[in-house]
Structures are given as structure tokens and as C-alpha cells.
Amino acid sequence: MTTEEIRLVKSAERSLRILEVLGEARGPMSVTELHKRTGYPRSSLHQLVHTMIAMNWIESANDGAMVGIGSRALLVGTAYLDRDLALPHAIRTLEKVRTKTGYTAHYARLEGPSVIYLATRESTAPHRATSRVGRQLPAHATALGKVLLAELTAVEVSAVLPDDPLPPMTAHTVSRHADLMRELDATRKRGYAVEREQNTLGLGCVAVPVPYRIPATDAISCSIPLARFTELEIGLVTESLQEQVQLLTVKLREEGIR
């Protein structure tokens, strides 16, 4: 059954949208701004907000003028990670990748037009990439997303991504489907994705799929400072990623994890 065939319950849909908007914000948001972002009528918005505050899905500050994501959302989000049988194995792989390469390593999953970061192990270097667990980024702007989109057909890619122009994260982000398709074709041929400053200035990234599912839904990447993002370094990091991903994939299949 598709989303279009499901009759959505308006109050539930609005409550979930409120959580998404607050989850994407970097801090507490005014109720006025929340109204602008959602477009919901003020009366029903206030009722929903007060209900969600009472149930700890939202926290209020400044006498209710500001609202932010609450503790209940954290508990439910953590439950998603706790039930993922692949994740403990993936985390151990990230630690090996970080130790061997010295770079920050990420594990993410493709969900629609985005990738969701499920685990990160940060480099100890002073200039390091950071990405919190639960962060969601456009797939077309990340090496993780590109290597997973490359697992799909052109028709499937077009179906999950927004129309041109694709939303930019930096001035270097690929903005047209035709250009992205060329990148994905190159990714399929070499078996890994490369991205340079398309989502974070000053950083490049290399990503490899984890093919314990077909098509692969998960991938591992390393973020590399641009000053060290040479062809030689890309090759060395990719080799390390592929070696560890192969071991991870064998382990997941042996454990019957799908």
C-alpha cells in the first residue's frame, strides 16, 4: 500500500511533522517560527504543542515562548538503534577504520532522498569532521548517499529525489539530475563514491557500500581534510574501507542479519 492509498490521520500527521521540524532545528524554536514552518492553524498548533509538552515529546522554555525536542523523542530514537542487529558489528568496523586511517568514519543508511547517520567514530585530529548520530543529509550531496543511490536504477533514483534543482549544501553540491547520474555511473564502475566539498567546505569524503542487503541500504565513509584529499590518499583510504567492509559483510551474513 502506497502513502497515497493510506488515509492519513491529520492530527497524527501534524504531530509527527512538528517533531521533524524541531528535530531539524539546531536549538529551541519560537512557536511563531514553528507556525511559519508548518503552516498549521494557530489554534490547533497550540493544542498539539501543549499536548506534546505534557507527554515530554517537546520541551518548553522562556515561559512557553520557545519549544524544542523533548526526552521522549530521544528514547524512541535510541530504541531504533538498539534493535538494529547490524549496528554493533558496524561500530566495531568504524573503530578499526578510524584506527587504520586516522580519519573520522561514518555508518549511514539510505532512507528516501536522504542518508541517516547511525554511527560515527571521530578522529582525534584537531581539524576533524563531526556528524552526530541521527543527522539526516541529502543523499545527492554526500559520498554515503551517492554510493547507495548507485545501487539503484536511474528510474529509481529519479523517483526518490526531488526535481531539479537539487537542494544545495555548498556551492559545490551537484544540482542537476543529469550531472548526478554521471557521478553515479562513475561510482558504479569504480565501486566507491568520492565527494569533494559538496556538503562541508574543506572536506572530501570516500564511501563504500555494505552489501549485506541487495540493493545495499548501508554504507561506510571516511571524511578527509581537503589538504590531504589526494588521489594517493583516496586510494589508500578506499582500500582500507573495502577491506573492512568485506569482513563486516561476511560477518553479517554469517549471523543471518538482513
Image: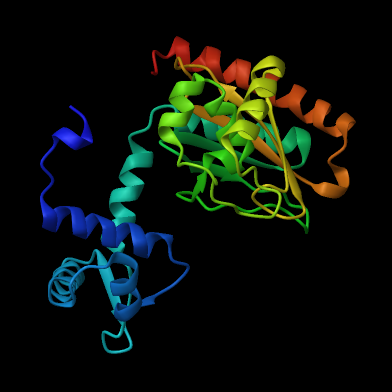
> Does residue 13 appear left or right of residue 131 in this picture?
left
Residue occupying image coordinates x 64% and y 50%: 199
- Please state the horizontal and vertical placement of residue 6, each as a whole percent of the image: 13, 37
Residue 236 screen position, x and y as percent: 82, 27
Nearer to the camera, 245 or 198:
198
Total labels: the figure holds 0
Color encoding of the figure: rainbow
Question: What x and y, as percent, mark residue 164?
Answer: 52, 43
Q: Is residue 199 left or right of residue 34?
A: right
Instruction: Quarter of the image for the C terminus: give it.
Output: top left
Locate residue 143 relative to residue 113 in the image: left or right: right
Place of residue 48 in the rendered image (x, y in percent of width and height, measured from the top left)? 15, 68
Residue 94: tell me if it is visible.
no
Can residue 25 be seen at all in this image of the molecule? yes
User: With respect to residue 224, does 31 lie above or below?
Assistant: below
For this rendering, which residue is in front, 224 or 21? 21
Residue nearest the observer in this picture, 36 or 256? 36
When asked about the image quadrant of residue 208, the answer is top right
- Work out which quarter of the rendered image holds the N terminus and state it: top left
Q: Residue at x 89, y 30 (%)?
A: 232
**Residue shown at 19%/36% (left/top)?**
4
Splitting the image into 4 quarters, where does residue 209 fall? Answer: top right
User: Where 239 falls versus 101 (above or below)?
Assistant: above
